[in-house]
Image: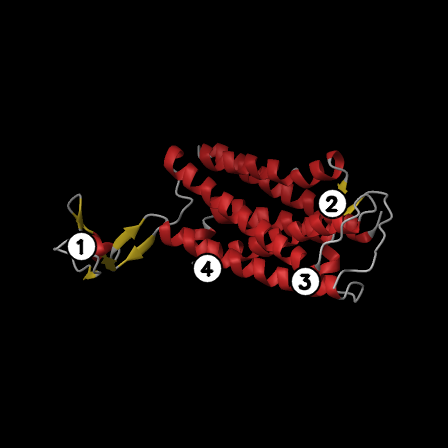
Amino acid sequence: MKIKEKRRITLHGVLTAIVIAAIVRQIITGNYENAFVGILTLVLFGIPFFIDRHLNINIPPVMESLILCFIFAAEILGEIDSFYTRFPYWDTMLHTTNGFLMAAVGFSLVDLINRSKKFSIQMSPLFLAIVAFCFSMTIGVLWEFFEFFMDTFFGTDMQKDFIVSQINSVKLNPDNLNIIETVKIESLIVNGEDWMERLGGYLDIGVIDTMKDLMVNFVGAVVFSVFGYFYVKHRGAGSFIKKFSLSYKNTSSSRPAEPQ
């Protein structure tokens, strides 16, 4: 067994042990919602193995390790240990990383087809980069749908709220014209409590968070798509992206000349 594969198995075992300990702790303290998050994390940990065994696609140890660390950082550190609220940029960092990783997955899957002997078509580097970008953005949008669904039907707060101290809206125009009226919030009483004194403004329910997440996902997707483009243009130059390529098990892949 290669050293990298041993490290991958060790990392998976360590993270799994930590997650199981977190689940037990949440059950003991009666926090069953967080216990469910821990169980979900274990299920997500199993996805790379499912892909490896049932789809016959071998995920390189480096990429699998990054995916496992990302899941752990998002679910265990972010949700259970409250890193999302304790560290203001934790969510932003994870969504940027997600955009990068999902672009890597999309790029690798299409590049696998591009290099396979079973397919006669050859896709240009620009097309591969565009597919990687679109794949990443699609996953990002679907995740935001999931957050909205959970918040709406299960009363969670996956779409984190932002404080708004000023409103710009045509709805506030007294003559019902399409002219923006700007209102600075100076007082806000909710259920007899002064939110200006407590929070400093009004709560934006998820909209700013969703748009921010999609924008940083966009950044991560663009960065990897650019890397992917130049990798395909100059394949075999030892690019960093080479470590993220997926390949069929026990299949020798031919590398025909890339279209210009």
Q: CA distance from mark 2 to mark 1?
A: 58 Å
Q: Amino acid at mark 4?
A: Tyr
Mark 4 vs 3: CB contact within 8 A? no
Q: Is residue 60 visible?
A: no
Of labels 4 and 1, earlier in sequence is 4
Circle 3 residue: 229
Identify the mark nearer the N-term, 2 or 1.
2
Q: Secondary structure at mark 4?
A: loop
Question: Which residue is located at x 40 percent, y 33 percent?
Answer: 154
Q: Nearer the viewer, residue 65 or 106?
A: 106
Q: Is residue 156 above or below residue 224?
A: above
Q: Amino acid at mark 1?
A: Leu
Name the residue rendered at 39%, 43% in the picture: 157
Which of the marked residues, 1 or 3, is nearer the chain's N terminus? Answer: 1
Of the two numbered discs 4 and 3 in the rendering, the one whose residue sits closer to the viewer: 3
Q: Position of residue 168 (x, y in %)?
A: 24, 59
69 to the left or right of 141: right
Q: Are marks 3 and 2 in contact (CB under 8 Å)?
A: no
In the image, 96: left or right of 171?
right
* Color theme of the render: secondary structure
Q: Secondary structure at mark 2?
A: helix
Side of 142 relative to 203 (left or right)? right
Question: Compared with residue 36, is residue 7 higher up or lower down, i.e. above or below?
Answer: below
Give coordinates of residue 64: x percent, y percent: 69, 48
Residue topped by disc 1: 172
Q: Residue at x 81, y 53 (%)?
A: 3
| Residue 51 visible, this orientation | yes
Q: What amino acid type should be assigned to the residue bearing mark 3?
A: Tyr
